[in-house]
């Protein structure tokens, strides 16, 4: 509803507001309201639960923007200019239809939280400079995508504290993940992981507020048995076992055998796969 968006933009301009919140308003086409990108003082823009299928390159004109929420829209691609937002700290692109990230996507100078949950991203979807985000990113959410590997150069994300990769088709955990020394939350449940690298025990997931989830993977029996026996103290008991020479030998044999799981789940029914053509109602406002 361009009329609703236009009214909100006009009001924000007149009142010199720093926030614009338009969730669940049926907004479909941002290009109909170019005045939006003239709100240079806007720091927070919420356009969640709408019908937006294109993000204009003019988004880069919002130089003061710190928070951008495009959760649950119809975006299939992003403009390369989005990474030019100099103050953006949090970007929510969850529940869209993204299949790749644009060139230069890793160039955000201040991004701390990135949510790409429930899209169609694969391990070849990342831009060449995605690893540059490692200089600022603290939380990365990429659950419910089509990844078969961790994001590239994950060991360079030295400030990362939260990494959520649940519900993908990831087969292995990088041995160098332990270089992310600030990581306290790692969610890997519902993937295709068989074994864990012993190096992962250098990370600390046992403190207050920490969490490590590896359930619902085709883990080898030696690991699965520890998880079943440990109950609430699973992380400590499991990690103690991963440090043993017995397990290191098992890991080496299994890894070198090439018996990693290659199964993939059918994701054709995902909401992000469906292209729905909406007939927009007449705006009576």
Image (spheres, rainbow, N blue to C red):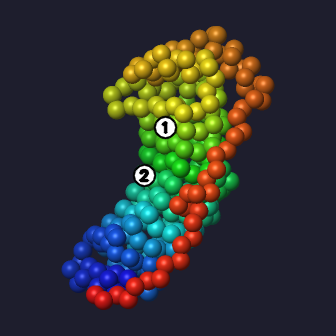
Q: Is residue 13 visible?
A: no
Q: Nearer the viewer, residue 105 or 56?
A: 56
User: Dot 1 corresponds to which residue?
Assistant: 187
Q: Secondary structure at mark 1?
A: strand
Image spot of residue 164 (x, y percent): 49, 43
Quarter occupied by the C terminus? bottom left
Q: Position of residue 90 (x, y in %)?
A: 40, 57
Q: Quadrant of the N terminus?
A: bottom left
Q: Callout 1 environment at 10 Å: few (<14), some (14 to 19), or many (20+)?
A: some
Image location (x, y in percent) of residue 82:
50, 67
Mark 2 lies on residue: 113
Task: Say above or below: 106 vs 35.
Answer: above
Residue 155 percent location from the top left of the image: 58, 38
Instruction: Name, please, the residue furthest toward the left.
Output: 15
Residue at figure coordinates x 47%, y 83% from the top left: 279
Q: Is residue 231 left or right of residue 220?
A: left
Q: Secondary structure at mark 2?
A: strand
């Amino acid at each position: 509803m361009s009329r609703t968006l236009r009214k909100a933009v006009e009001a924000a301009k007149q009142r010199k507001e720093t926030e614009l919140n338009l969730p669940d308003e049926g907004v479909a086409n941002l290009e109909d309201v170019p005045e939006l990108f003239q709100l240079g003082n806007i720091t927070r823009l919420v356009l969640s639960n709408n019908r937006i299928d294109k993000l204009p390159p003019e988004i880069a004109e919002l130089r003061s923007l710190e928070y951008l929420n495009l959760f649950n829209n119809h975006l299939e691609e992003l403009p390369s200019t989005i990474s030019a937002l100099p103050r953006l700290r949090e970007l929510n692109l969850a529940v869209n239809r993204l299949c790749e990230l644009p060139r230069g996507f890793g160039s955000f100078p201040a991004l701390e939280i990135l949510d790409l949950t429930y899209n169609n991203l694969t391990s070849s979807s990342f831009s060449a400079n995605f690893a540059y985000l490692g200089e600022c990113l603290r939380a990365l959410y990429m659950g419910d995508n089509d990844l078969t590997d961790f994001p590239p150069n994950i060991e360079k994300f030295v400030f990362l504290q939260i990494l959520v990769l649940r519900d993908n088709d990831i087969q292995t955990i990088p041995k160098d993940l332990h270089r992310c020394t600030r990581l306290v939350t790692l969610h890997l449940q519902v993937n295709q992981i068989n074994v864990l690298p012993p190096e992962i025990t250098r990370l600390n997931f046992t403190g207050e507020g920490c969490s490590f989830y590896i359930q619902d993977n085709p883990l080898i029996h030696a690991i699965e048995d520890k998880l079943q026996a440990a109950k609430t103290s699973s992380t400590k008991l499991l990690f103690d076992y991963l440090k043993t020479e017995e397990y290191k030998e098992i890991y080496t044999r299994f890894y070198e055998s090439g018996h990693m799981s290659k199964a993939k789940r059918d994701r054709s029914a995902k909401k992000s796969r469906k292209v729905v053509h909406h007939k927009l109602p007449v705006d009576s406002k």
